[in-house]
Image: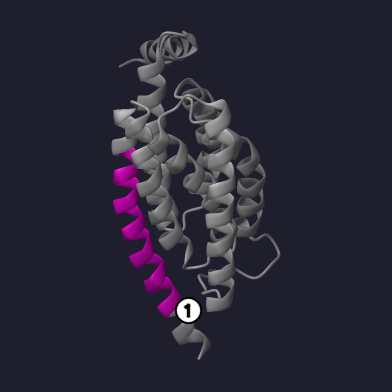
Amino acid sequence: MSLDQLLATMVDYGQLLLCNDQKLLWEVTLVIISIFAHILDARQNIWSRILSFPILFMSIRVYTIRKLYGKVIYAIISTIFHTYAYIKWKGGHQKPLHVSRTSNQVLVYTTAAGLLGALGWSFVIAKYSDAPPYAIYGDALYVSFGFIEKWFMSHKKLERWLIALLRYIAFSTACYSAGATMLGIQYLVLAFIGIYGQIKWYKSYQTTKGKCV
């Protein structure tokens, strides 16, 4: 394929994305980029932080159509968290950021806060949305625990992957209930990547811990 053909293909693809009736194409693109970014995330690759920004912008469009408004609001607000995470991961003149663990007390408090937040959010959305109940509750869990997970992720806390697994399973249920089968399958795939991430980060944690002893 020549350079002109490649550019023409990219232009055609961009035009398809701008069309209002190309919902499926948006979802396919989001799924591919998201899975790739999560694999990089499991490997602590800084590009996972960079790819998070186009993923967030695409999520706003895709999940607005699916009436998963918690995910939309989460995508908007979490841009701040991803910017902070990028700065932390990049390091600059600071010491390299290594995988560490949080205390059991903090984990209990954050879990309780996530559950209360999910209950509150689902109560509010249920009043104003006609989405199925499972979609509302799964969406609420995903959003509420999302900010907690992103904070742990920013500081490379090992527990972030356990929270991520809960979120992915809950949101997969939400997507299926909202009729977004492809997105539901995506989050099941992300759950398996989460297990991979837990293993990779745990090995990294053990290596760093051994050096510090």
Q: In terms of depth relative to the viewer, which is nearer, 44 or 151?
A: 151
Q: In terms of depth relative to the viewer, which is nearer, 122 or 71?
A: 122
Residue 130, percent from left and from top: 47, 24
Q: In terms of depth relative to the viewer, which is nearer, 117 or 26?
A: 117
At 40% across and 12% down in the image, what residue appears? 22
Residue 50 appears left or right of 202: right
Q: Which residue is mark 1?
A: 208
- Residue 191 magenta-drawn? yes
Residue 164 appears left or right of 87: left
> Image quadrant of residue 197?
bottom left
Residue 128, percent from left and from top: 57, 27
Amino acid type, mark 1: Thr
Q: Which residues are magenta?
A: 186-206
Which residue is outermost to the right? 93
At 44% across and 53% down in the image, what residue appears? 41
At 54% across and 49% down in the image, what residue appears? 119
Q: What is the secondary structure assignment of the residue under circle 1?
A: helix
> Image quadrant of residue 108?
bottom right
Q: In terms of depth relative to the viewer, which is nearer, 140 or 191?
A: 140
Magenta segment, prevailing SS (helix, strand or loop): helix
Colouring mode (rainbow / by chain / secondary structure / one colour): one colour
Q: Is residue 95 above or below residue 52?
A: below
Residue 208, percent from left and from top: 48, 78
- Residue 121 magenta-drawn? no
